[in-house]
Each structure stands twice: as C-alpha cells, then as structure tokens.
Amino acid sequence: MRFFERNIPQELKDKKQWVAYFKKIEPGVSHLGKVMISPRTYRHAKSNDPTDWTDFYSAHCFAATNGNLDGLAFVLTEGIVFIDIDNSINNNGIISEFASKMLNEFPKAYAEKSCSGTGIHILLKGKLPDGVMKRNDNIGLEIYETKRFCCVTGDMIAGHNELIDYTEKVGEVAKRYLGVRKPNPIARPVYMTPTLDDQRVIEKALRSRSGDKFSRLFSGDITGYATHSSADLALVNMISFYTQNPDQIDAIFRTSGLMRDKWDSPRGDSTYGRVTIETSLANTVRRYEMN
C-alpha cells in the first residue's frame, strides 16, 4: 500500500470518517473500480452509515495489516468538498493545462495524486450551491460534498498542503464548469414519505423471497443480466417495492456494489441514476405495506 500519511491534513485525520478499499478491475471498463470496506464490520462500507466508519489510525492499521486492501478512503458528509480531475498527469509527470488551472483556482488547498497516479484530487472546506451538477465527463471533472467516498493517497502536489475554506470560490467554479440542474419536469410519485429507514429496507429485501437475488445484486454481482444497466434497474426495482422516495432509493443504491461513476453521469437535465429511479417508480405496481 503506497501511502503518505504525514502529508494528509491533520483536520481530516481528526474526523472519524475513514474506511478502507480494494481495487476492482471490471472487464471492458477502463476506469478502475474500488470497493469500500468497513474496518468495523469487515463488510461493504456505506457512505450514509457512520457506524461503518472509524478514525484514521484504526482504518490505517486495518488496511496496512490486510493484504487484500489497497488504501484508505475519506467519507464525505458536509463541510469538505472533493474535486476529482481525471487524466491530469501524463507519463512524464507533466500536469495538464486544465488541472493546472484548477490548482490555481484554489491556491495552497490540499491536492494529491490519485490512486492511479494520473488524476488529481483537491480537498477543501466549503459547500456547493443547491442544484449544481456533480460532473462533466467532457472535461473529466467531478465535484462532490456528501454521500461519497474519496480515496486518499497523501501523494501531495507540491505547495498544496492546507485544508482551506473556499466556499464562495468552489461554488463559482462548480457553476462555471459543471452547470446547474434545471427543475425536473417529470412528475414525482405520490408515495414519497419513507416508512422504513435505509437499513430496514435492506434487511427486508434480504429476507424476502427474492433475497438471494437482491443479495447478489447488492454485492455487485450482475451474473445473468445482459448489461450492467439492466442489473442497475433490477436492483432499483427491488428497492422501490419498499420505498417510493427517490432520495432514499438513491442513497440505498449508492451503498451497493453496483454503484459506479455512470450513476451520476448527465442525461439531459437529469442524471443516469435519477432517470433509472424515475423509470422504476413509473412502473412500480406492487408496494410494501406495513402491518
């Protein structure tokens, strides 16, 4: 595990928002996948469940003593913004023009090379404006602040070693490069209020007659499905039986092994994930009813 602990800002280390991960290579997919593991449960870590997270040093010890793990990841909640710039560093170690421009947007803000060594991460204090898009694949830029894992290497970019508050600046940059989502014209379903919390939905799905199927999909196994997208919809359909709240469905899906970057990719004024959820809800006939 190539890891530079000393370079990571102490303020990040002080937060009990750390998990471990291992790399996952999928056939036909160029982007390196990663599976998050909880140092507390030894199972898949969820980005919306603090009981899966631990302190930095416990996570570091867990990853360092387990040969199957590749590193640590920080869980984004609120207050820390994660900027991910793809294809930023070439084989000669030269930083791209766009990545240099982004680094200059946030002077001294903590920045590091990604796990692959070709991307750059920037971490800073801040908050994103409401409705701002999260990614732009055309320029290889993603910006997140909640319900997301950020794999941290400590492989610092020289001169960028401080955790600085750039709230106003990051909002302006996000709007400029990613845009703001327009109000979705698709009508929302009537059944909006969650009656079960996320963990109860997962537990009930696992104990249902389709529990084995749900378990395989939730762990990321798409065996038997023609495409990854059809597996995505199948899992969302199962979740939609227990909750018709789009935000809750989204949160649960993000904790599954099927979660990938495509989930947040733009689809007109929406995203692939949101369209998948809306498709499922529009076709959901049977719904769970509490006794």
Image (tube, rainbow, N blue to C red):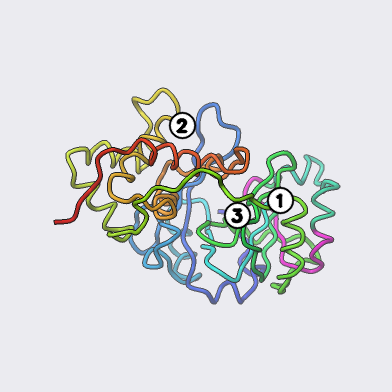
The residue range painted magenta reads 103-116
Left or right: 190 as drawn, with respect to 6? left
Q: Residues within 10 Å of mark 3 (few under 14, many from 20)?
A: few
Q: Are the residues tagged 2 and 1 within 8 Å (C-beta)?
A: no
Left or right: 189 as drawn, with respect to 184? left
In what element is the residue under mark 1? loop
Measured as percent of width and height from the top left, residue 31 is found at 59, 37
> Where is residue 160, by image quadrant?
bottom right
Left or right: 40 as drawn, with respect to 156? left
Residue 109 sits inside the magenta stretch:
yes
Q: Which residue is mark 2?
A: 229
* Foreground disc of the pair 2, 1: 1
In what element is the residue under mark 2? helix
Q: Amino acid at mark 3?
A: Arg
Residue farthest to the left, as pictured: 291
Q: Amino acid at mark 1?
A: Gly
Measured as percent of width and height from the top left, residue 47 is found at 45, 59
Q: CA distance from mark 2 to mark 1?
A: 25 Å
Measured as percent of width and height from the top left, residue 10 is found at 62, 76
Q: Which residue is mark 3?
A: 2
